Image (cartoon, helix red, strand yellow):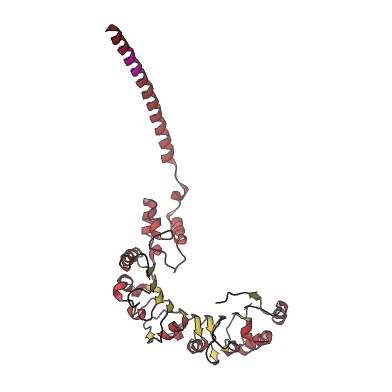
Amino acid sequence: MLSVLAADRSRLADINSRIADLERSLSELRNERVIVQGRLDEYKYPVITLPNEIVCEIFIHFLPVYPRPPPFTGTESPTNLARVCRHWREIALALPMLWRAIGVIQPHRMSYKRQNQMSEVWIKRSGACPLAINIAYYGGHDGSLSPEDVPAVIAQRPRWERLRIDALPHALTVIDGPMPRLRHLDLALCANGIPAPFEFQEVPLLRSVTLHGWVSSKAVTLPWGQLTCLTLLGIERSRCAAILQQTDSLIHCILEVVTSGPVDHPRLALPCLESLVVKERRGIEGDLKGFIHSFVVPALRSLELEEQLLGSGPVAALESFISQSGCTLQRVCITERTKPTKTYLLAFPHIPDFSFARVERR
């Protein structure tokens, strides 16, 4: 019995000694933890020390270039910025420019109902900023769009600054109404037949328009006379000419012309035009030779066109075009060149910027 008690006393002493050693180790670790935590607390990540103004600029450049709308979720979404930390969230939610471009797309993995809910949130966060709206719709049983599909963005029509619609022509009736701040319109409409024309009224600030395809050009009536920038893509030359005859204030123009249809080159007097790009999208028949000579553009400073549009004698044709318009060109770019570079440079030494390029065929 005495031997057992002696053994227990020895074991207890050993346990107490080990506990004391462990407590000393814990005490040392706790002290070291305080020191390490203090160093961490004192450290400031460089990005956190940036002035809010710099962070705002970084946030703006993180997004797709305006007016392309960022996705509601995912890598390029401003919602990601609001999830990094409390400080960044405060900055992101207080920066209206992050939320001013909104895209509503169908078909899409996110339902229209959910997209509309997200649109409402973004619109509130955008404050008083003008809005860039992108509506792409080919959903529904008949492909038609109704106001109930996009009520949040439709309600903000007076704030629209830029509008792109990629849908059937019927979608235009959904957006009908005054757009007092609209400056740019981009339409990519498609249909099997010729749609009833839709007139854009009460768009006093509209200056820039891009139309994709013949349906878009036929589906709308616009205040052509107030436009200063016009892009027509994949549109027959007769329709291009009909539109250009109404654009007296045009300053910049890009044409990608379909060559099918009858050859008719009416006179196109554009007294304010400063830059002109003419490309040819291959059609069923015909060509654009002679089309460039229908332009009378005395203020033209920049010209880009395919060599074949000048005909078999491109140098002489270009000289004739310049003489006819009485313009002083500062820049010329000839694409799809076949004639020697030297031929052009010798003929036009007075043009400071004369270059050549290749273009992708559609």
Q: Is any atom of residue 83 visible in this view?
A: yes
Residue 258 sits above or below residue 135 on the image: below
Residue 180 in which image quadrant? bottom left
Q: Is any atom of residue 177 visible in this view?
A: no
| 200 in the magenta segment | no
Residue 339 in which image quadrant? bottom right
Quadrant that contains the C terminus? bottom right
Judging depth in this view, the residue of 299 and 36 nearest the camera is: 36
Which x, y percent locates residue 52?
A: 42, 55
Which x, y percent locates residue 140?
A: 33, 74
| 14 in the magenta segment | yes
Judging depth in this view, the residue of 344 and 140 nearest the camera is: 140
Which x, y percent locates residue 308?
A: 63, 83
Residue 289 in which image quadrant? bottom right
Q: Which residues are magenta?
A: 8-16
Which x, y percent locates residue 184?
A: 44, 76
Residue 297 sits above or below residue 137 on the image: below
Q: Is residue 134 left or right of residue 117?
A: right
- Going by the picture, which residue comes out furthest to the left? 1
Main SS of residues in magenta? helix
Residue 113 sits above or below residue 89 on the image: below
Residue ID at (47%, 81%): 213
Judging depth in this view, the residue of 90 and 115 nearest the camera is: 115
- Going by the picture, which residue comes out furthest to the top? 2
Q: Is residue 22 left or right of residue 277?
A: left
Quadrant that contains the N terminus? top left
Counting every numbered tag in the picture gives 0
Q: Is residue 4 left or right of residue 66?
A: left
Judging depth in this view, the residue of 194 and 305 nearest the camera is: 194
Residue 25 sits above or below residue 264 on the image: above
